[in-house]
Amino acid sequence: MKKSSIQLFFLMVLFVCNACNDEWKEEQFEHYVSFKAPLESEGVANIYVRYKDGQKTTFLQPLEVSGSTTNDMDLSVRVGVDADTLGILNYERFQNRQDFYYEQLDNSYFSIPETVNIKTGENTALMAIDFSLKGIDMAEKWVLPLTILEDPAAQYKINPRKHYKKALLRVNPFNNYSGTYSGTALKVVMDGHESETPIVKSQIRSYVVDENTIFFYAGNIDEDRKDRKNYKIFATFSETGGVTFRAENPNMKFAVKKDASYTISEQMDAVRPYLLHRYITLNNVDYEFTDYTLVSTTAIKFKVSGSLILERQLNTQIPDEDQSIEW
């Protein structure tokens, strides 16, 4: 009797083990189609596109098929622009501060395919988005909102989670000189109060105008100002090392006091030997401007002087420029 019980026990263990051995071959989840565009703290996914005058730049947006097994069919996934989600995001995030709203990227600046094909045996595909950004005004916060469209005739399933079936791509064009500069060496003082403690911003963000020109906001003005468009300062970099500053708004009473220049230096990382540090230093930044809207009854003159430094870190092991830069 005891021997029979032992034999029965081993038979049961053998049966369970045989049943478990093939479990991994079966799909444990669902083959959902999703964008790979994780949201960042701003509520959008930042993408970086090399600016080229009069030329297209292609950004490759990944699509994925989820699940524990490999995709077993050819999929033709329909995609489109989704303005409704962007409108909801703007209101929920910024309420009535419409000057903070993200703007939907105009159709003239991009083109997307109607469908993206994912082949049998592959769980990912790249959607080619062509950008032509000449003339874009980066004083606006441009977003390209995408969604995976329903198709009753197709065999794919859309991921039910909204952050997976949609991609809110904030478009950040870049050139050799754009990015976030360190502003700790740049002093901003009111005219007549030069002996007082200056205003210093830790970071000053710059935006692309063309291949050799950027703009930033004067003094301590940034994206939080409703009237920020009135205070754009343009900086054009020459091949000989000079930098020319200008402003288009005459009400700023913008005046350059010194000729600015820039230098570029590079250094490999001491710990990560594949990482290249590139530093762009703007020297002799010295200008004056008038803030005529901060106080409705009084125009305030500011003096700005010092230097700006941009550090760009490049992973030399990655061939694609937008991916190799550690943003």
Image (tube, grey):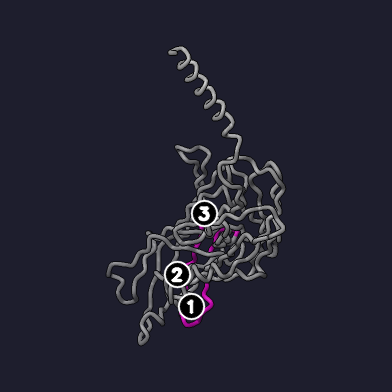
Residue 46 location, x and y as percent? 53, 58
> What residue is pinned by disc 1?
230
Q: Magenta part of the protein: which range?
A: 239-263
User: Badge 2, how many Cα within 10 Å: few under 14, some, many 20+?
Assistant: few
80 w.r.t. 38: above or below: below
Q: In the displayed image of the protein, which residue is found farthest to the front? A: 1
> What residue is pinned by disc 2?
92
Q: Nearer the viewer, mark 2 or mark 1?
A: 2
Q: Nearer the viewer, mark 2 or mark 3?
A: 2
What's the residue at 54%, 44% (across, down)? 315
For marks 2 and 3 on the same chain, the one whose residue lies earlier in the sequence: 3
Disc 2 and disc 3: Cα gap in Å?
19 Å
Q: Does the magenta stretch include residue 320?
A: no
Which amino acid is tagged 3?
Pro
Quadrant (top left, top right, bottom left, bottom right) of the N terminus: top left
Q: Residue 38 carries which label?
A: 3
Which amino acid is tagged 2?
Glu
Let me know if residue 317 appears in the view: no
